[in-house]
Each structure stands twice: as C-alpha cells, then as structure tokens.
Amino acid sequence: MLSVVIPAYNEQGMILKTAETISGILKNAEIPCELLFVDDGSKDGTWSAVEEASKRFPEVKGISFSRNFGKESAMFAGLANVTGDCCVVIDCDLQHPPEKIVEMYRLWEQGYEIVEGVKADRGEESFLHRLSANCFYGLISKATKIDMSRASDFKLLDRKAINVLLNMKEKGAFFRALSSWVGFRSTTVEFEVQERTVGASKWSTWSLIKYALSNITSFSTAPMQLVTILGVIILVFSLVLGGISLYQKIVGIALGGFTTVIMVQLFLGSIMMICLGIIGYYLAKIYEEMKGRPRFIVSKTCGKSEDDTKIIG
Ligand code: UDP
Ligand code: MG
C-alpha cells in the first residue's frame, strides 16, 4: 500500500480539494492508498475540513498537533503514523503536481527505494528570494555533498528508509537533506512548481532566514571553523600592524594614531561578537538536542484509532 503524508497549516480551503484530487488520481491508477493529513496546529478550520474529508473518503485519515510545530515536525509525524510499504510526502497546496505520485510509485515498483521530486524550475520568485535561496542551497549542497539546489520535500520513501529516518535521534532534522543522506537506491522525478491557488505561502522572510540558519548548522560545522580561520587572519594583520608600530616607536616617529586604535578596536570587537554568536548558535543547538523534547505532540485523530497512533515522537 502507498501512504501519502500531507502536512497542512491553515489550509482549510485546500483540504477537500487536495483529498479529492489525490485519491481520484490514485484510484484511477489502481494504487491502493491511504492519505494522512497532518494538521500542524492550524488556527483556521483546517481540522474540521480534515474530519469532513475523512467522512467522505474512507482512505483519508488525520492527526492534529497540539500546537504549530512546523513543517519538518509535521512530515516526521506523518511518517511515524503511516503503515504503507512506501510513502509519498506532498504539500497540501497542490504546488507539487499530484499526477507525479503515480510516476513515483511506478519507479518504486521497479525497485527504487527513494524517489526525489526535483523542481524543473523554481517558479515565480522575487530576485532577492532567488538570490538568498541560491546562497542557502549552495552552502547546504557543500555541507551534504549532494546537489540540493532543485531539491524539494516532495518525495517517495520506501519503508526501509522511513524506518531509518524514524530511528534517528536528531530533533532538529532537515528532512530534505536527510532523505538523501541516508542513501539507498534512488532516482529523481522532475516536476514543475504549480501556482498556489488558495491561501498564501506560510513563509515570511524572517522564518526563511531562521530555517536556513538552523538547517545549515544542523548539517555542517563549517561556520565554527570559520571562527578559527578569522582568528588566524586577524592575528597575521595584528602582527604586521604591531611590527609597524614598534618600528615607529623605536625610530621615534610614533604619532597620536588615535583613528587606527579606534578602528582596530571596533573591528576586533565586532569580529569577536560574531564569532561568539556562531559558537552560541551551536551551543543552543546542543542544548535543544540535549533536552530531548519530542518533535511533535498529537492531540486529535480522525479516521484512525488513537491506540495505533504515535502521539508523541
Ligand atoms: N506547512 C506546515 N507547517 C508550517 C508551515 C507550512 O505544515 O508551519 C505546510 C503547508 O500547509 C503546506 C506546506 O507545508 O502544505 C508548504 O508550505 P507553503 O506552501 O507555505 O510553502 P512554500 O510552498 O511557499 O514553500
Ligand atoms: Mg506551497
């Protein structure tokens, strides 16, 4: 059986349409399936729409978080609560074309264990957004040694890969990169990003910046090494500057030099602050992981019994 995990946050207008479209497509292709909506603590009528959908379509199930935990958590909760032999993760807004699920499933039948959906193009985006996305993916691709520039969260995972992901203790996991990191026999399916028809993107610029920082630091320690490199560069500079000042002192031409002092101090001060900040960021990460808090907490279910639901994970 194929499971489809659909994270949804404030998507009341999309739920029924998405459920109908996906189950229609899979029925036509004669693929046995279940659809699991993960309501990520929505503030609108998303949950009642999911309940409505589960009454209307027998294959639709739903779980609802106690609050908003973010899309990463929603995807993991979905994976933890599906029973299929393979599972597709797809956005609720139909920006990922659902017809591609059939193509992914056929590839899985041929023995592929991970089928990645890659974006043929990145859709309509502002120049600034594209620039920062390129920066982010450049860094992440370096850190993971996998080309991530066209990666998306739209993918099919075999049961084996799902179990590996679920057994990882990492709380601040970055699904998009981890699913490639685990390896297995994988292939890709290209898709065009569709326009969003209902509602708006849930990402503000600030949340994207936080997302980028958190994912870079969870995959790479390079920024910490940056601190050392900066230190060495500044050491070289200060040796040169120290040498010059000493020479001037000895030959007796040492001037007031107030400007230099101020500038050097300001420069060193800010570099030091940045470095402390970087170290602090990793410390915070370690602290978060150490606490070992669950990634998600389920408060309600529909279309499936609470007994076989993973409530926290
Ligand atoms: N989403 C979620 N929790 C969040 C934010 C988003 O489950 O905190 C879901 C959202 O409902 C959608 C998917 O993640 O199904 C992608 O979100 P969105 O369309 O806002 O992102 P974009 O397509 O703009 O990258
Ligand atoms: Mg979207």
Image: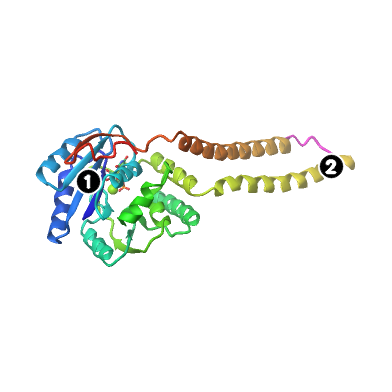
Provide the secondary structure element on which disc 2 rests.
helix
Q: Is residue 114 left or right of residue 144?
A: left
Q: Quadrant of the C terminus?
A: top left
* Image coords of residue 235 (percent x, y): 72, 45
Q: Is residue 256 left or right of residue 15?
A: right
Q: Which residue is mark 1?
A: 36
Q: Quadrant of the N terminus?
A: bottom left
Q: Quadrant of residue 294?
A: top left
Q: Nearer the viewer, residue 190 or 200?
A: 190
Asked if disc 1 is less than 8 Å from ligand 1, the answer is no
The structure residue drawn at horizontal position 46% and vertical position 35%, both measured from the top left corner, is: 288
Main SS type for the magenta part? Answer: loop
Q: Amino acid at mark 2?
A: Leu
Q: Residue furthest front?
A: 307
Q: CA distance from mark 2 to mark 1?
A: 72 Å
Per the rendering, the mark at residue 78 is none
Asked if disc 2 is less than 8 Å from ligand 1, the answer is no
| Residues drawn in magenta | 254-258
Count of numbered tags: 2
Q: Which residue is mark 2?
A: 246
Q: Amino acid at mark 1?
A: Leu
* Image coords of residue 111 (percent x, y): 30, 66
* Image coords of residue 242 (percent x, y): 79, 43
Instruction: In the rendered view, tell whether residue 106 sits above or below residue 164.
Output: below
Badge 2 or badge 1: first in the primary sequence: 1
Specify the color scheme.
rainbow
Q: Nearer the viewer, residue 142 or 266?
A: 142
The structure residue drawn at horizontal position 15% and vertical position 38%, both measured from the top left corner, is: 51
